[in-house]
Amino acid sequence: MSFPGGSMANKARRLLLKSAIGIGVAVASTAIGTRNMMSAVDIREIDVEIEGRKGQLGSAQDEKDRAEAILAATQARRSSLQTQLRVTDEARFREIVKLQKVQARLDSRELERQQTRQQIEVLSSDFDESIKAVNERLRALYKASRRTSHLELILSAESFSQGLDRVGSLESVLQQDIADIRDLLDRKREIEIRQSVLNQQLAEIETLKKERQSVQQEIDRRMSDHKALMARVQEQEAELAKDVAAFEAEAEAIRREIASLRNKRQAEIDRLERQRAIEAARRIAGQGGAVSGWVWPVLGIITADYGGCTFGQCPHLGIDIAAPLGTPILAAADGVVLKAGYAVPGNRLASYGMTVIIAHSNTEDTLYAHLADITLPPTVSEGQFVSIGDVIGYMGVTGWTSGPHLHFEYRVNNRKANPRQVLG
């Protein structure tokens, strides 16, 4: 099976290997030690920042608690005001009942006033007509009495008896007129009495109107005062609710920041742990029988050696080394990355899956297959120089594999060779 990227491999060998190969592990170790020291400082700084944010969170929580306490008191006050409002409503209802009674009395007085006024108008009209009639009779009687005396009435009669009748009739008319005049005087007094009653009714109506206005003003004042108080309390409650929400938002933002800092801290710790694992792997690999500057790419259980058979390859053209998922994979020697990607482009489950190929000289290549891809993709890219022991990726299960392991191949002049020639 040939390696992908052969043309680029030859070009990379000629341009890069002459200047790259030979850089020692000591330089890389020094850099790693510096990074570890800086990372430890970074973690301490993150811890300090987390503690500072915790203090801010405590302050924001205290402010929120105080605002909530004030809000609770305000809500209790509003509840009390609502109770008072119900009492005020009851009092207002009583005032309204009173107002209705006043209005009923007022309506009754208005009706009585209208009836009295109508009676006065009728009496006045009759009185005026009667006055006219009496005046006319009196005027006629006066004229008649001036022209003719009682004696003349007797003498002008056909008989004495007729004369007496005439005189009696005149007296009778006069007596009736006097009676009518007395009746007119009585009716006049009745009209005056009714007018007095009417005036009293009008005065009482005015008093009832003032009473009604006073009751209505008192109702309006109570309602206006209570509504204004309720509006102020509700406004205070709304402002306090905004304060509580603002403090909660601030506390939530600080909590998110603390969570982010903790994630950052954990990520840094995880990175340091991976770096420690890498250093340990390098130390162990360096003690594991390196030949001519080569190290084992990973330490683990060898599940298939070169030349044997596996479920997917016979003869087996490399060494399979099993280790836990996420275990760092190291460059077996200095070199230039020729490929970092899927063996079959776009298909993570085919063939060797995620692979890295490194050229170590003009004739030597190594292939690292079944690497992790999604959560821990390869850490190198094509054309990049790597030193012996550098992490190039992590243990995965991509491609044709029955479990997490590294398939490691060694090639000389594009021909498969036993990796133990260089690994020992």
Image (cartoon, helix red, strand yellow):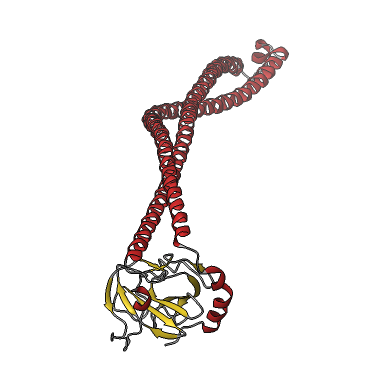
Extreme residue in the front direction: 292
**Percent from the top left, x then y, of residue 106?**
48, 26
Q: Picture quarter containing residue 18? A: bottom right
Whether residue 161 is visible: no
Extreme residue in the right direction: 147
Q: Nearer the viewer, residue 349 or 4?
A: 4
Whether residue 292 is visible: yes
Report the residue at 34% width, 77% height from top: 420
**Percent from the top left, x then y, of residue 318?**
35, 81
Report the residue at 39% width, 58% height from top: 275
- Using residue 303 as the reference point, say whether residue 116 is left or right of it: right
Q: Picture quarter containing residue 68? A: top left
Q: Nearer the viewer, residue 52 or 100?
A: 52
Up-down: is 405 above or below 31? below
- Using residue 166 as the reference point, say whether residue 147 is left or right of it: right
Up-down: is 349 above or below 373? below
Report the residue at 36% width, 78% height from top: 421
